[in-house]
Amino acid sequence: MKTCVRCELSWPHEVTYNAIVDIIRDNFRHQPSYRRAEPSDALMASEAELCSEELSTAVAKNITPRCSSSRRSPCWSYLLAPGELLHLKLYLEAWRLRTGRSAEDDPNAFFNLGDNPENRYSWSMPARGETTGRMPGFRKSAGRYWHAQSRRWVTDNERLACLGLPVYASMAAAAQCPLLQIEGSKQMAGNAWQECNAALVAMVAWACVRTKPQTWG
């Protein structure tokens, strides 16, 4: 048996959300090491993880890997599908046209190779008036998120780390929680919010509503 409870706003949620965000920002700004996160912060994988990623992809594609047991190859483009190579070429050309410099010289240049840039851009190009862009939104599609400077894609674990999940020891230590190990992480890293942002929105939503008094008639 289902029980439905009607609710109503008890306080403007925009006011509560903005107040909490301002407090969080002020607290971080007073930290000596504070700086705004950049897309390049997503690159957290160790050399061992990168070698494993390259080797497993090469084996799955029946391609001779160019990495060694302890060092990845300097460029993973040989593992990309023809469509991904074309999209990468178009992204690189568009980046140079927009900025006047090569994307490979910008540590924050990321492209979603699953999207055709002739239709739309899914990249970390800074918006007008900004100096640093944002990581393209993750989706469950098979698109790879390419980092131009390191000439490789973002690993599945790195995508989860972008969403705030403690899949690396440094993150788990900072959050004072156990290290999270997830199988099938690619399916979890799409169409999802960053964990802390989602928790904040849920908290504000619950804090700003109350049960609506029932009327009998």
Image (cartoon, rainbow, N blue to C red):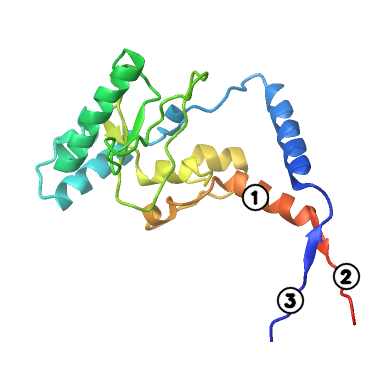
**Label 3: which residue?**
4
Report how many numbered discs are placed on residues in the image: 3
Q: CA distance from mark 3 to mark 1?
A: 24 Å
| Residue 127 shows in this picture | yes
Q: Residue at x 9, y 42 (%)?
A: 64
**Label 2: which residue?**
213
Q: CA distance from mark 2 to mark 3?
A: 13 Å
Location of residue 107 by image quarter: top left
Q: Is residue 212 left or right of residue 93?
A: right
Q: CA distance from mark 2 to mark 1?
A: 27 Å
Between discs 2 and 1, the one toward the N terminus: 1
Q: Residue at x 73, y 76 (%)?
A: 4
Mark 2: which secondary structure? Answer: loop
Q: Position of residue 96 (x, y in %)?
A: 29, 18
Q: Position of residue 113 (x, y in %)?
A: 28, 39
Q: Give neighbour class at mark 1: few <14, some 14-19, many 20+ (Cα, 10 Å).
A: few
Q: State which quarter of the image contains the C terminus.
A: bottom right
Q: Which mark is residue 199?
A: 1
Q: With respect to residue 5, does 175 lie above or below?
A: above
Nearer to us in this view, 50 or 140: 140
Nearer to us in this view, 79 or 143: 143
Q: With respect to residue 149, does 65 lie above or below?
A: below
Q: Residue at x 18, y 35 (%)?
A: 86
Q: With respect to residue 149, does 162 lie above or below?
A: below
Q: Give neighbour class at mark 2: few <14, some 14-19, many 20+ (Cα, 10 Å).
A: few
